[in-house]
Image: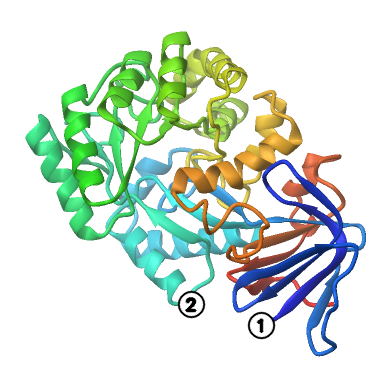
């Protein structure tokens, strides 16, 4: 398919805005970009950009496609048949794509469903975002996420667990450095996998050319992961100056997942969320917001990731994280959009292919009504997402 987006506003994803720009898409790639006119052959389909904005396809750097966003999704997922989980996950994938999120990084699956879903999307069997997956997260016995994780104790067991996930075909190895909110009787700030255990998992992943990520809320656990060579910090609730400096020195990004805590806090116990999860959320919230501020002010790379699938954190509402980065994180609308495009692509290791509207890159594009730099809320309105293109194919919307 050859398509030209004609004469309008383009948010490149790297801080630039192009006015009166035309973007030519051919063979799944962005072939040419020009301002103030381009000679378009008559047989090419055209899409005028009058009153609209063209952006890169968004990337959610942290989701759980096998969790359904119910009040207690981990418990719910453990009691339902895998077939039901699969069907829910397929619909969640469709909703995510229709929201303008063309790529995701799944950070903990269940029963191999994430593997099958990735294959189904890649083959065109079902619609959904391009998926990078971590399979079963690796945790200590009884550690955060043990219900869907692979429990391992000591460097040798962690090394074996990482090798097993790599053998299964993961894109990322996820390691659990600290406790968290959604696991009972676990402290979010507590260390879990040790530095030596984390290093064993990281070494195996890197030997296989895979990236790593860690669930890390507590300060010492974050530092353990950084010293172990981790590639990204998920959540990062209890940062301090020393930890931020370590992240800057190593150029390690933070994925704060504001949506997860925001939805637990705003919906609360009355919506059916377990009391322990609400109580822990309220406890960590001020530290989390302060950590995001510290990271932003220091210049740490911050990528948008929702933790979608956690309570009331629904697949298909992913771009709410962009607004939360503005409202709670102190980011400008442009910087928040970059967090969900260019920076997220860097986290996934796909910065040469995705994340910006540039010649030669994959044509993942989103067309929205109005200008999100003036009103970030347009990204949250499904009706304002006029068109979604993934790999040069229009998956939502019509050619005018």
Task: Name, please, the residue furthest toward the bottom.
Answer: 43
In this view, 313 is above or below 52: above
Query: What's the distance in space between the residues labelled 1 and 2, CA to CA?
Result: 16 Å
Q: Quadrant of the N terminus?
A: bottom right
The residue that disc 1 covers is 1
Q: Callout 2: few (<14), some (14-19), or many (20+) C-alpha neighbours within 10 Å?
A: few
Q: Earlier in the sequence, mark 1 or mark 2?
A: 1
The colour scheme used to paint the residues is rainbow
Q: In which quarter of the image is the C terminus?
A: bottom right
Answer left or right for 248 relative to 212. Answer: right
Residue 56 image point, x, y percent: 67, 55
Residue 162 visible in the current orientation = yes
Residue 74 image point, x, y percent: 37, 42
Answer left or right for 126 relative to 136. Answer: right
Q: What element carries label 2?
A: loop
Q: Callout 1: few (<14), some (14-19), or many (20+) C-alpha neighbours within 10 Å?
A: few
The residue that disc 2 covers is 124
Residue at the image point whose x is 38% and y is 70% from the top: 119
Residue at the image point whose x is 22% and y is 26% from the top: 193
Q: What element carries label 1?
A: loop
Which quadrant holds residue 194? top left
Residue at the image point whose x is 65% and y is 25% from the top: 329
In this view, 42 is above or below 229: below
In this view, 389 is above or below 366: below
């Amino acid at each position: 398919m050859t398509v030209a987006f004609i004469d309008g506003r383009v948010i490149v994803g790297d801080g630039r805005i192009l006015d009166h720009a035309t973007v030519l898409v051919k063979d799944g790639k962005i072939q040419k970009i020009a301002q103030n006119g381009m000679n378009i052959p008559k047989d090419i389909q055209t899409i005028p950009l009058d009153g609209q904005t063209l952006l890169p396809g968004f990337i959610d750097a942290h989701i759980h496609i096998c969790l359904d966003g119910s009040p207690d999704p981990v418990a719910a997922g453990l009691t339902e048949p895998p077939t039901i989980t699969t069907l829910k996950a397929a619909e969640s994938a469709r909703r995510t794509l229709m929201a303008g999120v063309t790529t995701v990084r799944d950070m903990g699956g269940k029963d191999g469903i994430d593997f099958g879903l990735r294959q189904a999307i890649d083959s065109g069997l079902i619609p959904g975002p391009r998926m990078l997956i971590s399979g079963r997260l690796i945790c200590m016995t009884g550690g955060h996420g043990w219900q869907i994780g692979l429990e391992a104790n000591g460097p040798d067991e962690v090394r074996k667990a990482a090798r097993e996930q790599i053998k299964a075909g993961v894109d990322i190895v996820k390691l659990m450095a600290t406790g968290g909110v959604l696991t009972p009787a676990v402290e979010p700030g507590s260390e879990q996998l040790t530095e030596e255990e984390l290093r064993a998992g990281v070494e195996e992943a890197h030997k296989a050319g895979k990236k790593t990520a860690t669930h890390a809320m507590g300060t010492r656990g974050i530092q353990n992961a950084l010293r172990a060579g981790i590639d990204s910090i998920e959540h990062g609730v209890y940062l301090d100056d020393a930890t931020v400096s370590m992240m800057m020195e190593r150029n390690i990004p933070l994925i704060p997942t504001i949506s997860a805590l925001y939805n637990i806090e705003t919906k609360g116990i009355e919506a059916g969320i377990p009391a322990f999860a609400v109580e822990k959320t309220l406890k960590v919230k001020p530290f989390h917001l302060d950590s995001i501020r510290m990271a932003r002010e220091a210049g740490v790379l911050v990528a948008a990731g929702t933790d979608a699938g956690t309570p009331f954190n629904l697949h298909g509402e992913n771009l709410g994280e962009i607004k939360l980065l503005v409202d709670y994180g102190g980011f400008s609308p442009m910087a928040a959009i970059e967090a969900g495009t260019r920076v997220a692509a860097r986290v996934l290791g796909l910065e040469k292919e995705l994340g910006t509207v540039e010649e030669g890159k994959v044509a993942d594009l989103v067309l929205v009504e109005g200008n999100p730099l003036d009103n970030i809320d347009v990204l949250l309105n499904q009706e304002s997402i006029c068109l979604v293109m993934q790999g040069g194919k229009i998956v939502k919307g019509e050619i005018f």
